[in-house]
Image (cartoon, rainbow, N blue to C red):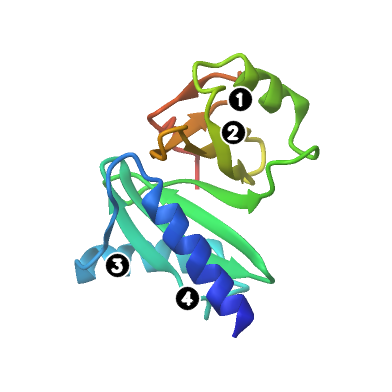
Amino acid sequence: MKRSISFFVILFLFALTLHAQPRPVTDRGVIDALRTDFDKRNSLTPDVDVNWFSSEYGYYGLYSIDQKTYMTRYDKDVNYLETFVRKEWDENVPSSIRNSFNKSPYQDQHVTGYWEVIDLGRNGCCLELMSSDGKSSRIWGDDKGRFSTEPYATNISN
């Protein structure tokens, strides 16, 4: 029960931080396509509950496995992009990411969430931010330490 509440609190906070407000995916065809690809990629966890959302950049699903929260992204054509795991913004964050953030135009904002790409051969992150006036936003970091308010939409091979 405690784990479920924590997941939904994280889910709620994550949803609040999107550049454009996310909307739950309601199109049955899109949900089926997302779920089919998700299950193919995650064959060891076929019964995991995924909450699917639509944003201006495509779709993403939020889910938890073994007390870790994940975000899997797809483009508008339901092509897989990447998967992130939520981690703490602490001393374990790679120094290259921290250094890049500290030199970025976003450095005056408070990091409320840190997501790290987990796909093999890929690097990147997503930071959820809170400004001093209480506005939340998200920035995306690439493997070169650059940050943008738009995700780096690079498809990877199946």
Label 2 vs label 1: CA separation? 5 Å
Residue placed under numbered mark 4 in the picture: 49
Numbered badge on residue 31: 3
Check the image and name the residue furthest to the front: 133
Q: At numbered mark 4, what does the secondary structure look like: helix, strand or loop?
A: loop
Q: At numbered mark 2, what does the secondary structure look like: helix, strand or loop?
A: loop
Q: Are marks 2 and 1 in contact (CB under 8 Å)?
A: yes
Q: Are marks 2 and 3 in contact (CB under 8 Å)?
A: no
Numbered badge on residue 90: none
Looking at the picture, tell me which residue is in the foreground, 142 or 148: 148
Residue visible at 41% across and 46% down in the picture:
17
Query: Within 10 angstroms of label 3, few (less than 14), some, or many (20 or more) residues?
Result: some
Looking at the picture, tell me which residue is in the foreground, 86 or 52: 86
Residue visible at 36% across and 63% down in the picture:
52
Residue placed under numbered mark 2 in the picture: 124
- Residue 53 location, x and y as percent? 33, 58
Identify residue type, mark 3: Ile
Looking at the image, is mark 3 or mark 1 earlier in the sequence?
Answer: 3
